[in-house]
Amino acid sequence: MRRRTAIRLLIVSLASAVNPWLYTLPYDPVKSFAPVAMLVAAPNVVTVNPGLPANNIRELVALAKAKPGELQYASSGVGTFLHLAGELFKITADVDILHIPFRGAGPALIDVVGGHTKVAFGSVTSSAAHIRAGKLRALGVGSVTRSAALPDVPTVAEAGVPGYEASNWIGLVATGGTPEPVVARLHKDISEILDSPEVQKLFASEGADIVHMSTAQFGAYMTSEIDKWGRVVKQAGIKAQ
């Protein structure tokens, strides 16, 4: 009788690319896993309180440069996507905006809606409802192309900060050493699920984009994300709290 080997799968995200730079991990963030499939990506969107005199990215940058350290942005906590996306913006645009951490994306965005802090770099999924209600003004999305959820909002790059890109992504990996035929079968099955109209409609309604990559492409992408966010963590001097 043939003995079956259990396959362990793990959902990974942008946090998997950031954690190696904030914590001492008991595993290798690359070698310990076998990439299976990229699933979805949700870009961030730069938003401001409607009362802030910044109607586009260029005006936000000009305002930040005119008042270095005075403008504040809210995040969901140290080392989170909202924090990293904000620090990447500061580095790429060469501006000084003060980071104010909150316990979660909800409280952070509510604080910006209330006009206490003025800027947020939240995901499209968490920000879209406030934008559509007119409680937040969207200035730019962090994806390479415009978001289908906010088609009238330009990318940050086209709006005045070239090279800026920030998306929170989700993928699937298996334990390192998983046989290639097993990984290939998993990738095939997952791709078929992602291609189904029902799944595409579900993710689109949440402001997330399905991303198709081969297992090799996904592995290279994870490595590039680890390198990218490592540079941000180091340059911004971010420490785990």
Image (spheres, grey):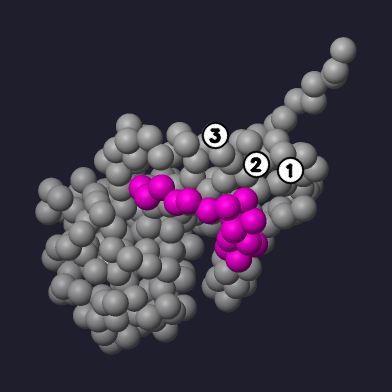
Q: Is residue 134 above or below residue 200?
A: below
Q: Nearer the viewer, residue 45 or 214?
A: 214
Q: What segment carries the magenta color?
A: 208-226
SS for dot 3: helix
In the shown orientation, is residue 163 left or right of residue 133?
A: right
Q: Are marks 3 and 2 in contact (CB under 8 Å)?
A: no
Q: Position of 42 compared to 9: left or right?
A: left
Residue 26 included in the magenta stretch of the image: no
User: Which amino acid is tagged 3?
Assistant: Asp
Instruction: Please name the residue that numbered disc 1 is placed on.
Output: 180
Reading the image, the residue beneath label 3 is 189
Measuring from the top left, give residue 210's x and y in whole percent.
41, 47
* Residue 132 versus residue 232 in the image, above or below: above
Q: Does residue 167 appear in this view?
A: yes
**Residue 175 quadrant:** top right
Q: Which residue is mark 2?
A: 184
| Residue at position x 22%, y 56% in the image | 150
* Label 3 crowd (10 A; few <14 / some 14-19 / many >=20): few
| Quarter of the image where the C terminus is located | bottom right
Circle 1 sits in a helix, a strand or a loop, which is it? helix
Please determine whether, in this image, residue 152 is positioned above or below residue 13.
below
Closer to the N terminus: mark 1 or mark 3? 1
Q: Are marks 2 and 1 in contact (CB under 8 Å)?
A: yes
Q: Position of residue 128 (x, y in %)?
A: 24, 49
